[in-house]
Image: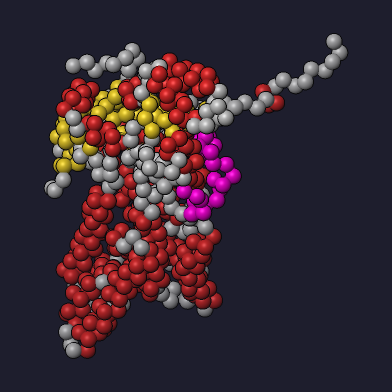
Amino acid sequence: MVRITNVGWVTVIATESLSKRFPRVTALDRLSVDIGAGVTGLVGANGAGKSTLIKILLGLSPATEGSARVLGLDIATEGAAIRERVGYMPEHDCLPPDVSATEFVVHMARMSGLPPTAARERTADILRHVGLYEERYRPIGGYSTGMKQRVKLAQALVHDPKLVFLDEPTNGLDPVGRDEMLGLIRRVHSDFGISVLVTSHLLGELERTCEHVVVIDGGKLLRASSTTDFTQTTTTLAIEVTDSDTHPDGTRAVREALAARGVEVTHEGAGLPGAGHILLLTAAGEQTYDLVRDVVADLGLGLIRMEQRRHHISEVFTAGSTDEQRKEAVGHGG
Amino acid sequence: MAVEQPLTGETTRIHDIGYRGYDGPRLGRSYARRSLYSQSLRGAYGLGRSVKSKVLPMLLFAVMCVPAAIMVAVAVATKAHELPVGYTRYAIMMQAVISLYVASQAPQAVSRDLRFKTVPLYFSRPIETADYVRAKFAALASAVFILTAAPLLVMYVGALLSKLGFAHQTKEFAEGLVSVALLSLLFAGIGLVIAAVTPRRGFGIAAVIAVLVISYGAVSTLQAIATTQGHDGAVPWIGLFSPVTLIDGVQSAFLGATTRAPGGVAPTTGQGVVAVLVTLALIAGSYGLLLRRYKKVGL
């Protein structure tokens, strides 16, 4: 079984038939997966076992069977050492409203073992890095959801961990806040050098942020692969063009021109308002983008949009239930 | 050539230094526990918290100390040979104030972390359940000890200044300190256990007052009934059922205190031993219950 998938692969988390059974439910079912350095997404529907996995990896909840190592440390015997080197941002609210972000993060830094002066310095640094400035001296109770999420992220990073667990960090954020948080998460690895395990029930947003994605469902591993694998196999291009005098129906003209060059094009979501104007085609690589550009230019039309469409979690679940995919998942994880 | 070079010292530059890692010391569990202890102890007097939350603890602290200061002043003025109230009796006399203090500060010590779900942030760090419980218990017990020992200190200093017998005063002061130390542990333990199961602060305050004050009222009433009906022997036994009378029993048996129980029925040595055992069992039991409670809360 090949574990090393590319040069420079550093295993940050490794689980070996990790199971967690509660009296009535099995939260994790013989989960074996290796997670490397970088940003890794952990995707699953609510109740798929994401939070349970994080608790076990933090050494807070014993596994029913199986074993796991975090940063090379055994979760069963070295929980305290693990918790010194990792950060954790919970899914739920965890901030007292009557203290300021600065006071709160300083306190949490000291709880991680940082001496008082270092705790204050690191707090000032990290709050600036997550984008909290003057407001950090005001009580947290008056913050917006986005600001609260930043404070939660700051307390997870204040002690400069090697790895950070982020449980649903985009929950409750509006689209702009979501993008900002995802950008911040990328920076946590690219600029801060901290590996990230981030959970979400939305595959789409993690695909843009993560190098690897692990999909679990019902406590079982469904798929573990790099996001480039996802992209290469599943990229769908959505294009939308303008109409012109020579081509009153630009969309149709482009579709026919592409069909003439052997590219199959479909319409998106028939029946929806405006849906007929968006064409979907499968990108075979760089040349598809060039082809679309040339075709549109030759027709003298304007290209309003050309964007990658990625599959939603539900599609991975339906695709994952085929035997072939199951084998692939086991091959990646096992 | 003669152009003045602008200062190129480090002070004139602004660098965007980006993210800096941390290679300094990580002081681990015992340091985190001590930090949590000092933060909680300061918090019990509203230090490091809003102005509003300083009012009640500081007020109660003043209410505890002022009568002691007045007594000392009176003793000095009248050249009395003894302080009007003994060291061991003072806390019993002021039990309502102490109960109110515990009722107001125990929920703030533990309920906030539970209510705002901050607890998981602690336990995802090196600190463990036992560290958290010990730090919070020790902090509240220390806070109550400061509240109860400060007036004794006022009385002791006053007594020495008015030249009351040094040896005698010192012995009684020491007995008083032992008594309030026990009381602090007992009250803190009971207060924290109740607060830890009532995440809503208001309920916590009411429940602590109910247990500390109402039990004292009920026990005193029963003791009074027992005396009037001639069952004096039952009085110390009944006293085991409320924290205040329990401490009263311990100190009248072993710390040279005169009991405040109705009819002045002092416990026998045997009853005193039982009172000590019950007190210690309650303190240990509170600690055990808190541990169990936080094991469950976990993450």
Residue A31 location in percent, x, y? 19, 31
- Residue at the spot 48% in from the left edge and 20% down from the top edge: A295
Vertical order, A152 against A79 (above or below): below
- Residue at the spot 29% in from the left edge and 71% down from the top edge: B211
User: Main SS of the magenta segment?
Assistant: helix
Vertical order, B240 against A271 (above or below): below
Query: Closer to the camera, B193 or A248?
Result: A248
Query: Closer to the camera, A199 or A109?
Result: A199
Q: List the single residue furthest toward the bottom.
A: B229
Q: Is residue A48 left or right of residue B121?
A: left
Q: Is residue A96 left or right of residue B9?
A: left
Choose top left, top right, bottom left or bottom right for residue A45: top left
Residue B45 location in percent, x, y? 47, 59
Query: Closer to the camera, B295 or B35?
Result: B295
- Residue at the spot 42% in from the left edge and 26% down from the top edge: A255
Q: Which quadrant is the N terminus of chain B positioned in? A: top right
Q: Is residue B282 left or right of residue B42?
A: left
- Camera sees residue B67: yes
Q: List the single residue furthest toward the right.
A: B2
Q: List the single residue furthest toward the top.
A: B1
Is residue A155 highlighted in magenta?
A: no
- Camera sees residue A106: no
Is residue A129 highlighted in magenta?
A: yes
Choose top left, top right, bottom left or bottom right for residue A54: top left
- Residue at the spot 51% in from the left edge and 65% down from the top edge: B55
* Range covered by the magenta-colored residues: A122-145
